[in-house]
Image (cartoon, grey):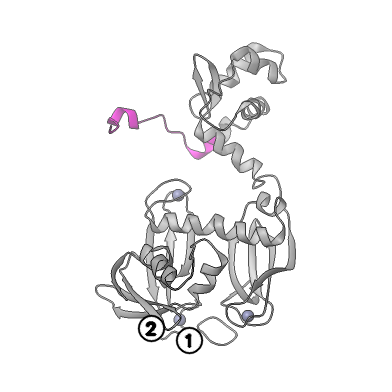
Amino acid sequence: MPHSPTERNGDAVSADEAFALIGNDTRVEIIQALWDAFEPGWGENAVPFSELFARVDIQDSGNFSYHLEKLTGHFVRKSDAGYRLTQTGLDVVRAVVSGSVTANPTLGPIAVDATCPLCDGPVEISYSDDSLRCRCTECEGIRHTDGGSGYFFLFPLPPIGLQQHDVDEALRATIVYNFHKAAAMLDGFCPVCSSGTQISVEVCPDHDPGGEDDCPNCGNPYMATALLSCPTCKRWFFFKAGGAVLTHPRVTAFYLDHGIEHRFASWESFVRSHDIEEELVSEEPFRLRVTIPAETDELQLTVDDELTVIDVDG
Ligand SMILES: [Zn+2]
Ligand SMILES: [Zn+2]
Ligand SMILES: [Zn+2]
């Protein structure tokens, strides 16, 4: 059932008001206590007032009520059964428990169980600034970043993704965590906040990918680059535009016909993206032809300026 306009209009708070609402020790303790009581699933998860008061280190119930009232509405929901965190309240704690607010680990460079799609050389990862870098130790790779060469990608990964896994799993976690987000954005919606995605594709007419630096004409590693971004939460992805078709069911079926169980969110999928050939068929309207090879066969797909597949041949 569609929402009525009144149901859609809640009391919005600005970012500084939202920060101020939780900028108090007692309120942080209340949120922590509700989080400790929270169990995933369809359970009630409400904590009665008296129990919540007992869980928080404050003696003055009037003062406690005041702070609880401030949180109620945006971070805490009140029902007959008691108090529980809202989705927004849960997301605030999730940012903390993933280590994104509290931890700042670093790692590497350290070798992982993967080989370079360009030269078969050993691959290594390193981690800092909540991001995982992946590079080849023997060739120029595809990107030049942080003043170094040989890079494949640099993706965000919450610190917990590094701390809970060994290095090979950390690489896999990085790919799964980010590729599914990129796929959601290709489907038109931001995986972080659900806003509509903005998609732009740029093509370098005189692309020169070789050498020790990125293309002097466009500064990018690919002839056609896609930028997916969210106008609300500013999450973004930048990648080879033709790689977008790796989420398409016809591509999955094509690979399966050639004995390849293709999964988009995998290192193998990233490796396959290097074999994709791109050709600009038309600028107005924008048409990019993407060729996927497998054995002696190939599949051709044409995408428009939003990377939507509009034609399949093969
Ligand atoms: Zn290499
Ligand atoms: Zn270029
Ligand atoms: Zn967003």
Q: Is residue 228 left or right of residue 113?
A: left
**Image quarter where ligand 1 lies:** bottom right
Q: Is residue 18 visible?
A: yes
Rendered residue at 55%/57% (across/down):
176
Q: Nearer the viewer, residue 108 or 264?
A: 264
Q: Which residues are magenta?
A: 1-18
| Residue 7 counted in the magenta span | yes
Hey, which quadrant is residue 148 in on the image?
bottom right
Residue 29 lies, in percent from the top left, at 67, 27
Q: Which mark is residue 9?
A: none
Q: In the image, is 293 to the left or to the right of 28?
A: left
Q: Is residue 58 left or right of residue 223?
A: right
Q: Badge 2 local density, few (<14 within 10 Å), some, or many (20+)?
A: few
Q: Is residue 57 left or right of residue 90?
A: right
> For the point 44% across and 73% down, which residue is it?
258
Q: Is residue 138 above or below residue 29?
A: below
Q: Quadrant of the N terminus?
A: top left
Residue type at the position of mark 1: Asp
Disc 2/disc 1 C-alpha distance (Å): 9 Å
Place of residue 228 in the rendered image (x, y in percent of width and height, measured from the top left): 43, 61
Q: Does the numbered disc 2 mark a residue whose Cβ is under 8 Å from ligand 2? A: no
Q: Position of residue 303 (x, y in %)?
A: 32, 70
> Mark 2 highlights which residue?
205
209 drawn magenta: no
Coordinates of residue 216 in the picture (x, y in percent): 50, 84
Element assignment for label 2 = loop
Work out whether 145 lies above or below 183. Answer: below
Q: Amino acid at mark 2?
A: Pro
Ligand 2 has an atom within 8 Å of the beta carbon of the residue at disc 1: yes
Q: Which residue is mark 1?
A: 208
Mark 1 packing: few (<14 Cα in 10 Å), some, or many (20+)?
some
**In the image shown, does 65 or 201 lie closer to the viewer?**
201
